[in-house]
Image: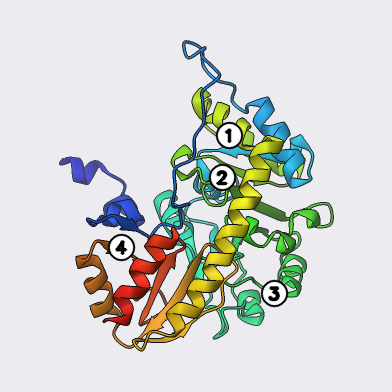
Amino acid sequence: MSIEQLARDNVRKLTPYQSARRIGGNGDVWLNANEYPEATSYQLTEQNLNRYPECQPVQVIQRYATYAGVKPEQVIVSRGADEGIELLMRAFCEPGKDAVLYCPPTYGMYSVSAETLGVERRTVASKADWQLDLPAIDAALAGVKLVYVCSPNNPTGNLINPDDIRELLAMTAGRALVVVDEAYIEFCPEASVVSWLSQYPNLVVLRTLSKAFALAGLRCGFTLASEQIINLLLKVIAPYPLSTPVADIAAQALSETGISTMRKRVAELNARRDQLKLTLAECACITQVYPSETNYLLFNLTDSEKAFKALWDKGIILRDQNKQPGLKGCLRISIGTQRECDAVTDALKNF
């Protein structure tokens, strides 16, 4: 029997998530991964690297709980929010029996994690305005344990109507968990649903330090939920999910100074995003620039494939969204430095 034959059937057939780094490219303007465009500086303070770290570093948990406005018992920290997506499936879904549901176009890891674990993937397409199709979701809920809702949504940048999320929570009560992915919520904090946790026992919220906190390379995310849900996730998480240096830097980022710095960073990026939206709209090759509550913009072009390649050849790497349902002709641009944004708009004006 070959190595390939020894592998699980679903893994042999699996198409891995096409992350920005996996897709590759060569250039000096990287605007395809929704990262903060400039490096941040931290000094390591913990030196006891001969010892295993805490499973759930107390200082990180306490500081994030204070920041998010929940109790420490309602927080679990993991290797990015991506691990939180998978932990929920491992804890709540029986492979070959249960299903997860999500509404494309949306973040691709919901699909990849489910397929990897042998959990059925069920999709209900978003409506034309990228809001939830609640009647269609209701009709598809049989056997579903987890419903993933990305708000603000990646890659479209829009918020999901909060009344629709409330209706979804009521619809799924006693049947499934609703997992609201708030990876980009720092760019519109007033839209968070974290304060709803006390009202809805089936609500889970995913967060990350990768975006507004400018720590994509740290791989540190959080799952916020009831104590009962968190206790179940603690049963399936790895023994030492965060290395000592990661916990050290995360705690610094979540200090009062770190949070203040993050909020200044967000204000700058939001202002640059709004200006970039206006500048892109002036490009003759662009037919529409969509509103965004995030650190990226989605836009439609008359010939997106040629534009994407022309930028690629200039060393300007954006994210092609043509294969996403309903996004034919669309590219996504992360908000970079002013120099990087100018490089994109100059190239597109001459395209």
Q: Please, what secondary structure does the residue beneath circle 3 have? A: loop
Amino acid type, callout 2? Leu
Q: Distance between the residues labelled 1 and 3?
A: 31 Å
Q: How far apart are marks 4 and 2 (CA)?
A: 23 Å
Q: Mark 3 points at which residue?
A: 161
Q: Are marks 1 and 4 in contact (CB under 8 Å)?
A: no
Q: Are marks 4 and 2 in contact (CB under 8 Å)?
A: no
Q: Where is residue 231 in the image (x, y as percent from the top left)?
A: 69, 36
Amino acid type, callout 3? Asn
Closer to us: 260 or 8: 260
Amino acid type, callout 1? Ala
Check the image and report above or below for 336 versus 116.
Answer: below
Q: How far apart are marks 3 and 4 (CA)?
A: 31 Å
Q: Where is residue 303 in the image (x, y as percent from the top left)?
A: 29, 85
Q: Which callout, 3 or 4, points at the residue further toward the start of the chain?
A: 3
Q: Is residue 243 visible in this depiction of the protein?
A: no
Q: Mark 2 points at which residue?
A: 209
**Foreground disc of the pair 2, 3:** 2
